Image (spheres, rainbow, N blue to C red):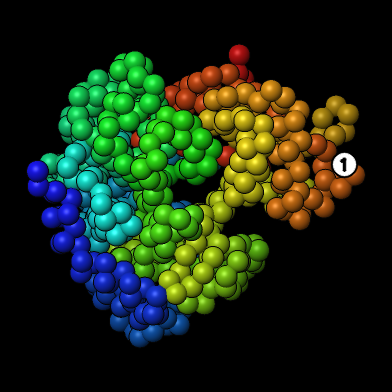
């Protein structure tokens, strides 16, 4: 039988060579991107008002504007959504990725231009396959089907051919015939709004397909796969799909789900590749599956800048381009894209582990942290702490959120963790103790505040009932797609809502 995968992989040789240039041509590749973006937007409203015709180098670009949040661009984006052209980007932008605003109920609408679809999102998906096949030359992934999960979309202000919805739905809606040939489920099922109905239909149809690869958010994919196992009455997923070999995952950290996937898929030939694909753009992926760090993809339609997180509160923080970052330092990421996001603070924080090429890990969100007592606890700390506690106790965590308790009736301050366990530890106290010790080990600020329980007392764990977090998302109309639960919060709004439902 013809090996379709080997045949298709020959078409990727040129792209493999291009990615190899990341190690030696960082600044030139990024400057080519910036020059292209500036040139295409020169006659837009934003370009004219910010003097793009005078931009000659990075310094002159940085002088065109300060750092922008969504609030600064919101008015421009809303005009674009109503059909205005040449506002932030050249021509008309018809697609808008709806970001759920994970710290509140307000949605953000991220423009997705035709250029952004092609030079960023689809290019990133292609490169994930390119890099995977480079790592696994004996792959047969194209001899079967890809199970790709997506969200839903709806008309945008009733404008013709204009859509707003989950990025994944926009990608599915505009997918090429080549991708559709290898993808399941069918578009009518993939774009269903009701996730529970979608999950049921996907599971019942997919069990009869030769699924070789998965793509989606780990939490939602796990929900679908669990239903597949229930319907098929099998013990392990490879009994349903003997040729399953890789899961391209992103959207949330994989660490809390890793053990559940290892138990579900026991094949030693199963691989996991992390991708960093957000509504705003496709930023990175694992080019080496033995290295947890991702490679920053620097020749897409995105120009990168970074701000040290300890300078975010300054009036004039030190903003640097990619070639100005330092290894081991925590940065907030700033992007300029081919959809008109100019010097836009995406809200994610990263730490670079190497240069040539630039590799990084996601450390959290600029808004997802706990710093109630000067402890500066970030999501990366939380993930590492939970992994240590799970490894030591045999527990498995499905979902979690944490927030400070500023002062209880005894005048005590602590962190409160609401955790939904897939497998409970024998002792919650032991789990909490190990988590607390690990957080002290990896975060010196947390350790200092925990010293002798003077400032911050021992953390508290509240077990969540099964399905609590899904019920919370469902009540907010955020079940499925790319929606996720805030992991850490400096206020108690989210955790109080969840606690009120935890019965």
**Image location of residue 180, percent across then percent down:** 15, 42
Mark 1: few, some, or many residues within 10 Å (few <14, many ≥20)? few
Q: Is the N terminus in the top left, top right, bottom left or bottom right quadrant?
A: top left
Q: 491 above or below 201?
A: below
Q: 175 above or below 44?
A: above
Q: 27 above or below 118?
A: below
Q: Which residue is mark 1?
A: 453
User: Quick check: can you spot residue 48?
Assistant: no
**Image location of residue 14, percent across then percent down:** 20, 69
Where on the picture, by quarter, is residue 411? top right
Where on the picture, by quarter, is residue 64? bottom left
| Left or right side of 170 for 347 | right
Residue at position x 57%, y 39% in the image:
487
Q: Is residue 420 or residue 293 the one in the foreground?
A: 293
**Image location of residue 41, percent across then percent down:** 27, 70
Residue at position x 72%, y 53% in the image:
443
| Left or right side of 308 for 94 | left
Q: Is residue 262 or residue 59 the one in the foreground?
A: 262
Residue at position x 37%, y 79% in the image:
25
Q: Is residue 187 or residue 207 the one in the foreground?
A: 207
**Image location of residue 437, percent across then percent down:** 76, 43
| Left or right side of 206 for 329 | right
Dot 1: element: helix
| Left or right side of 260 for 411 | right
Where on the picture, by quarter, is residue 264? top left
User: Quick check: can you spot residue 235?
Assistant: yes
Q: Is the C terminus in the top left, top right, bottom left or bottom right quadrant?
A: top right
Residue at position x 46%, y 30% in the image:
263
Q: Is residue 306 or residue 340 the one in the foreground?
A: 306
Please give the count of numbered marks on the rendered protein: 1
Q: 324 above or below 397?
A: below
């Amino acid at each position: 039988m013809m090996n379709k995968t080997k045949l298709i992989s020959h078409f990727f040789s040129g792209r493999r060579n291009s990615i190899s240039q990341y190690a030696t041509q960082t600044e030139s590749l990024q400057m080519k991107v910036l020059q292209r973006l500036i040139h295409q937007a020169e006659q837009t409203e934003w370009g004219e008002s910010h003097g793009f015709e005078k931009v000659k180098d990075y310094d002159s670009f940085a002088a065109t504007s300060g750092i922008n949040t969504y609030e600064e661009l919101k008015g421009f984006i809303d005009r674009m959504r109503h059909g205005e052209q040449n506002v932030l980007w050249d021509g008309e932008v018809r697609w808008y990725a709806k970001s759920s605003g994970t710290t509140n109920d307000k949605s953000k609408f991220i423009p997705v231009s035709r250029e952004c679809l092609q030079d960023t999102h689809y290019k990133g998906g292609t490169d994930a396959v390119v890099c995977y096949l480079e790592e696994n030359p004996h792959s047969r992934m194209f001899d079967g089907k890809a199970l790709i999960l997506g969200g839903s979309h709806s008309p945008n202000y009733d404008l013709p051919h204009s859509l707003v919805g989950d990025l994944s739905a926009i990608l599915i809606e505009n997918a090429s015939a080549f991708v559709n040939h290898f993808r399941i489920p069918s578009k009518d099922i993939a774009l269903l709004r009701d996730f529970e109905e979608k999950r049921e239909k996907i599971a019942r149809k997919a069990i009869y397909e030769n699924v070789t690869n998965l793509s989606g958010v780990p939490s939602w994919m796990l929900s679908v796969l669990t239903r597949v196992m229930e319907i098929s009455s099998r013990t392990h997923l490879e009994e349903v799909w003997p040729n399953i070999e890789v899961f391209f995952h992103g959207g949330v950290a994989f660490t809390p789900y890793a053990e559940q996937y290892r138990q579900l898929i026991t094949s030693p030939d199963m691989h996991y590749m992390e991708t960093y694909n957000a509504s705003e753009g496709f930023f990175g992926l694992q080019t080496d599956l033995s290295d947890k760090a991702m490679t920053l993809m620097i020749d897409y339609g995105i120009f990168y800048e970074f701000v040290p997180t300890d300078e975010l509160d300054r009036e004039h923080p030190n903003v640097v381009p990619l070639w100005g970052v330092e290894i081991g330092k925590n940065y907030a990421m700033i992007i300029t894209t081919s959809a008109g996001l100019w010097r836009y603070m995406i809200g994610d924080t990263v730490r670079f582990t190497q240069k040539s090429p630039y590799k990084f890990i996601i450390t959290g969100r600029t808004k997802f942290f706990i710093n109630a007592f000067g402890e500066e606890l970030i999501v990366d700390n939380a993930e590492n702490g939970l992994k240590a506690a799970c490894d030591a106790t045999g527990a498995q965590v499905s979902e979690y959120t944490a927030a400070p308790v500023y002062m209880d009736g005894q005048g005590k301050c602590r962190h409160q963790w609401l955790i939904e366990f897939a497998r409970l530890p024998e002792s919650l106290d032991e789990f909490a103790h190990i988590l607390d010790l690990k957080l002290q080990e990896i975060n010196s600020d947390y350790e200092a505040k925990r010293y002798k329980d003077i400032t911050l007392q021992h953390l508290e764990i509240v077990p969540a009932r099964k399905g609590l977090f899904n019920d919370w998302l469902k009540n907010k109309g955020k079940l499925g797609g790319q929606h996720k639960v805030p992991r850490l919060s400096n206020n108690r709004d989210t955790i109080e809502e969840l606690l009120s439902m935890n019965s």
